[in-house]
Image: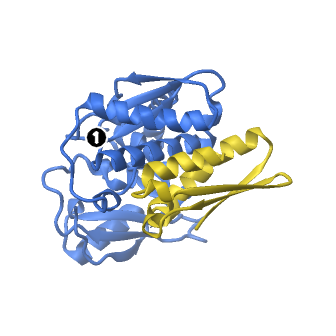
Chain colours: A blue, B yellow
Amino acid sequence: MEKRGESVEVRGKTVEEAIAAGLAQLGLRREQVEVEILSQGSRGLLGIGAEDARVRLTPIVEAAPAEPQEPVLSEEYWEGPEEEEVRAEGPKAPALSPKEVERIAREALQGILQRMSIQARIVSKPPTEFMLEGDNPPPVVLDIQGRDLGVLIGRRGETLGALQFLVRLIVNHRTRRWYNVVIDVQGYKERREQQLRRLAERMAEQVVATRRSVVLEAMPPYERRIVHLALRNHPKVTTHSIGEGDNRKVMIHLRQ
Amino acid sequence: MKELVEYIARSLVQEPEQVRVQEKQSGRSVTITLHVASDDIGRVIGKNGRVANAIRTLLKVQASKEGKRVFLEIE
């Protein structure tokens, strides 16, 4: 877990200028701080109504060793229980095989669906590249298949998010350990990943062509993570999340 | 709807035998009251109410099928 230092808020004509000013103030390099964009600012019309960009820089006192490539795997994107909620359950149990984890996850999911009077089959699938998390073992992926299952997805995937959260929580409670379980409905997440990847690439091209940043619509955490991952190795653009809570959005801007 | 809350709560607490769920109908509103052992309250509410809210989200699926509004209370 990272420790954080005292953060500073700085202004500048552009986001990049504000970041540079903040880094100078702290005497740190870009990779030693976490950047939160509070306001992108605006140029105004002929300088009238121009507003400064504002950013908050938080020094990372003890950065996680050797993983500068993986900032998008931060716990912000974790939609399961928090580590402390599991740790509170007592001593860690021995690790189970993926088959065993799958059995427990299936049972929990089946238990919930049955009590929601939903008739469906549960099929296990291999994880997609976006479901993998660095060096962690690959998640168990369960796809719910049947007819009229749109209600299980919900607006912006909200219902599916709740279902996955509860299944993970039950699995963690039963096993006294941390396992990543992904729940999907009729391959919805896989399709959404492809859509988001195409969107991210299209928007990145636009940012390069116009030299102007683009802010995508608000997205749930795992969808923002997909956009960040899709553009992680892009030579010309980089991404940040801005805004709070349900209103959090991905901004794509030029690398400097 | 009561069964769903009961199942989830029992799967998350340390003292499942203490879980009690009541369901009350009043017109188109359904109120579900979940009772758990006092040490287990945090487990069914969760940090920032995340667990309780996830249960509410699933309840809404069922309620909207039946054209009802559902409220979950925890005590």
Q: Quadrant of the N terminus of chain B?
A: top right
As drawn, is A82 to the left or to the right of A152? left
Question: Camera-side residue: B23 or B31?
Answer: B23
Q: Pointer 1 indicates a residue of which chain? A: A
- Residue B10 position (above or below residue A60): above
Q: Give residue A134's position: percent from left, percent from top.
A: 23, 41
Question: Camera-side residue: A170 or A227?
Answer: A170
Residue at 34 percent across and 31 percent down: it is A102
Q: Give residue A58's position: percent from left, percent from top.
A: 30, 70
When asked about the image quadrant of residue A197, the answer is: top left
Which residue is at the far left? A65
- Residue A173 position (above or below residue A125): below
As drawn, is A190 to the left or to the right of B31? left
Question: Camera-side residue: A238 or A42?
Answer: A238
Q: Give residue B14's position: percent from left, percent from top.
A: 39, 57
Element type where label 1 sits in the image: loop
As drawn, is B28 to the left or to the right of B64? right
Residue at 53 percent across and 71 percent down: it is A51
Q: Is residue A33 visible?
A: yes
Question: Camera-side residue: A134 or B33?
Answer: B33
Q: Quadrant of the C terminus of chain B?
A: bottom right
Neighbourhood count class around disc 1 (C-alpha, 10 Å): few under 14, some 14–19, many 20 upward:
some
Q: Which residue, given by chain and number where applicable, does mark 1 sit on?
A: A133
Q: Give residue A235's position: percent from left, percent from top.
A: 29, 39
- Residue B22 position (above or below residue A48): above
- Residue B53 position (above or below residue A95): below
What amino acid type should be assigned to the residue bearing mark 1?
Answer: Glu
